[in-house]
Image (tube, helix red, strand yellow):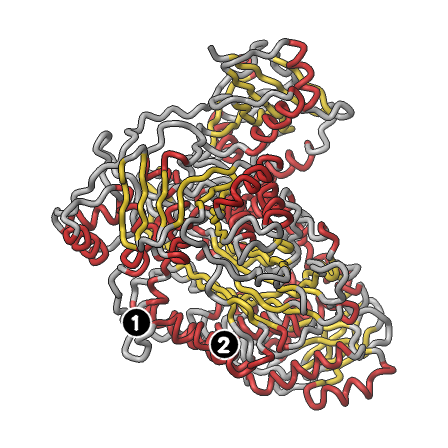
Amino acid sequence: MAYVHRIEVQYKTDPRLKVRTDRIRSLGFPIEELHLIDIYTISTHTRDFTPDELHQIGAQLTNPVVQTYTVDTPTIAHFDTAIEVGFLPGVTDNVGTTARQTIEDFTRQAFLPGEAVYSSKLYFVCGNLLAEQIQSLAATLANPLINRVHIKSRIEYGTKGMDIVVPVVHLHERPAADPVDLDVSDEELIRIGKEGIRDPKTGKRRGPLALDLDQLHTIRDYFHSLNRKPTDVEIESLAQTWSEHCKHTIFASPMDDDMPKGLYKTCIQAATNIIRAQRGDRDICLSVFSDNSGAIIFDDRYLVTHKVETHNSPSALDPFGGALTGIVGVNRDTIGFGLGAKPCINIYGFCVGDPEKSPALYRGKQKTNPILPPRRILDGVVAGVGVGGNCSGIPTPQGFVWFDDRYVGKPLVFAGTVGIMPRNDGMRNLYEKRARPGDLIVMIGGRVGKDGIHGATFSSEALDPQSPVTAVQIGDPITQKKLSDVIVKEARDRGLYTSITDNGAGGISCSVAEMAKECNGCHVWLDKVPLKYPGMAPWEIWISESQERMTLAVPPERLDEFMALLKSRDVEATVIGTFTDTGRCVVEYHGATVMDIELPFLHDGLPVKFLKSEPPEPNRSDPLPPCPERLDETLMQMLARKNICSKEFISIQYDHTVQGGHVLGPVQGVGRVQGMATLTKVVADSKKGVGLSQGIFPSYSEIDPYRMAIACIDTAIRGLIALGIPRDAIAILDNFCWCSSDDPRRLFQLKACARGCYDGALGFETPFISGKDSMFNDFRGFDEHDNPVLVSVPPTLLISSIGVHPDVTKAVSLEAKIEGDLVYLIGETSDEAGGSEYYAYQGMKGGIVPGLDIAAMKIRYDRLVHAILHDLVASAFPVTYGGLAIALAKVAIGGQIGMDITLSSTLRPDILLFSETLGRFIVTVDPDKKRSFELAMGSDATLIGRVTGKRLQITGPSLRISLPVSDLKAAYNKPFGGY
């Protein structure tokens, strides 16, 4: 018998009411107020709670000072429409899980399988909205992929309130593996690869395998050699393992005649190998490209790790869940590095469409399955990363946002994590791991559900009407926090396991099979895997990407201690198999073998692709319009461009001081200007710190992808140089997000970009330590007239940088500080405005993308770091997006103090002000240190003015600007002031 109760919690005076109402009004809904009630639906079947117990539970779920609650009684309020939003069956409900745990702790009785607490939100809408407006508002408050919605008018609500809904999962899957017939026509094989295996019971396709015809022929031939048909478990496993997401086939494949080893080995890996060999004993790298993260030396005792992932496809469908899963997933990459590093810093990056636009694009014909508007995506991804970091106790100081309408169909969502770990424990190097034959396979953390099925193969393709709902997951950072703490604070240092990795793309199918390479085999008992609900098919259990899970190799003699420790920390752990040395991956389900594949074929059996590139049509360059007469107005308008203005509305949502290591945060100075880099202490008793920055120039890619790569590397490095981090203490990471990567012209651009990465990294002597590529960031759908539409992202490269600062007390921030300080321009300005924010402001295409003399920059950057570490610099800020005038304005805004600047140049005034020439800084210096600073910098430094007054004044040939700093600040803060 089911016992169901409903507890409704509301604020006496809702502090969130005005912000919530204003936000909905800003989206065009004519509401008066939007109230919110938190709902908890308790469903049990073994026992019922008494009325007194229910009221005690209600009190536990309520802050009695500011909230009230009702039990099995609807909330009485004045409103016009009620909209309740809850989760669909099977969707991760973190609030419901926490409420259930609260009840269990209070009652000291555990809920049994099938019993749960489900959360939902009840909105009371005040205002007479039309029926279509109500439906539109409900669509704004919910996502049909993950949410259920119930709407009632005030009359329908009456005194009975909303209907009680228990979103329990009911499955009727066949508990066995099915054979798959690959002896079919090539047309049917292509359909299997694109749409998935046909389910023998329902006749429906199971979802994309992302296997091409050559790969399916190879699989068919392999099983012909075994004289049997493959099972669906085997096909699905091969699809995950061979996916572009996991195998990076485009970067690994030979390309043209000059890259027989592929882009990765020729450009990325080769550059790092050369740099490491040249450095010899001065090499800072400890682990590159071989583990879940890359690692560099922090000091004699510690190492730091870094990894940046993308979560683009899921974030297009469910921005909150996609971004949350992205950030907690890369946290696990940190926990899964070596024998377990502690996540200590998160970073983020969002490339999205203009949030003020709402293009009419659809995944289906007849205006069905519309894409989410850019504002909805931006709000969701910002919230997802915030919940992931804040609920995990990990600071999130570093990040960026880039706006371009070409990201409207598929946003790019970058999530990164830095970890800290002792280099050894006196007996072993903690950054080394190896599962041994006989070790037990132990899965820890969350349970397995249908969420995340086909995530790896789904992300390897373009978004289209068949994009699977099951590919979307929602992470649970609180469950993962418990897992993280017990691993990196206890189990690791007690030597309770020999290897560990994340259950990410492909779930246990990839984590177990990857670890099996360490010992040459594995044997899995799939029916032992703990499930969220009964009825899942074996193939679903094997490839599900349900979150908060990790796989460990535990020696049998340490199992009891390991299991007892995890039980004491409320982290579920289950033995699901054993590692072997048979050379095979064998999977059983209730005694039947559902997978038996040789490891060499599983990991390396995919056929080699030979890629060909061809140059695209040359880009046209628009003629440069006349120089604006009022450059002061131009400067104000440039400051208000979305790629230049303040994004503090994001920074203040993220806790960047938790763990107590904050040195220089995301906004700096009394004027609160977004920095290009941040600095964090990660070891409390050390004077050293970790600096983070990045470079991204999507607007350069269609003009000159080679120079784009150089610009990204230079900007990422320059952000750290401005903090005072030595160049030889810096490492970089690459994230390629390309589009239409089966198009030879796109491959030509990709190849040029990879060459730029090689030359840039080698030139600056900054090794790559980790990277990721996402190759099919395209949207295929329809417009409002059912015309086919292809929207591809601009070819995008993100370079992230990490560096170890030798003494954080020597670091400098970006803002001008003291009246009378001298202002220097480090570097020269050239006519290189192609792809710049100024060209975009003018509506222009083409032009000359900035180039760079790397050899000269190395000398310049080393000089500036020397000056900073010898206390000769008061502030330093890289000149990047928007050029020199924007950098001067931000330095003035940050210090809330004026500057009197004089520039001399033969360039046009607008190009002088807004060209994005690389290698430049704005630096302020104490007049007493003028001589020492100029001796240190040599000809790289040009004195251009002084810090003074309350206005930014810039004069030069045919140029005069004089603007109050207060006006500059207002323009800088305006675009997102209401977010």
**Mark 2 is on which residue type?**
Val
Q: Which mark is residue 254?
A: 1
Residue 153 in the image: above or below residue 407: above
The residue carrying pointer 2 sits among few (fewer than 14), some (14 to 19) or many (20 or more) residues within 10 Å by Cα, namely many
Residue 914 in the image: above or below residue 385: below
Residue 755 in the image: above or below residue 117: below
Q: Residue at 40% x, 42% y: name it.
A: 577
Q: Residue at 27% x, 50% y: name it.
A: 597
CA distance separating discs 2 and 1:
29 Å
Q: Residue at 53% x, 32% y: name it.
A: 93
**Mark 1 is on which residue type?**
Pro
Q: Residue at 47% x, 33% y: name it.
A: 91
Q: Kindly indicate the quadrant of the structure image that contains residue 662.
A: bottom right
Q: Residue 786, position in %: x, y?
A: 30, 44
Q: Does the rendering let one see residue 842?
A: no
Mark 2 lies on residue: 849
Q: Residue 527, position in %: x, y?
A: 37, 34
Q: Residue 594, position in %: x, y?
A: 27, 40
Q: Quick one: SS at disc 1?
A: loop
| In front of the other: 391 or 711 | 391
The residue carrying pointer 1 sits among few (fewer than 14), some (14 to 19) or many (20 or more) residues within 10 Å by Cα, namely many
| In front of the other: 436 or 546 | 436
Q: Kindly indicate the quadrant of the structure image that contains residue 601.
A: bottom left
Q: Kindly indicate the quadrant of the structure image that contains residue 753.
A: bottom left
User: Which dot, 2 or 1, sits closer to the camera?
Assistant: 1
| In front of the other: 68 or 540 | 540
Q: Does the rendering let one see residue 400?
A: yes
Q: Residue 591, position in %: x, y?
A: 30, 34
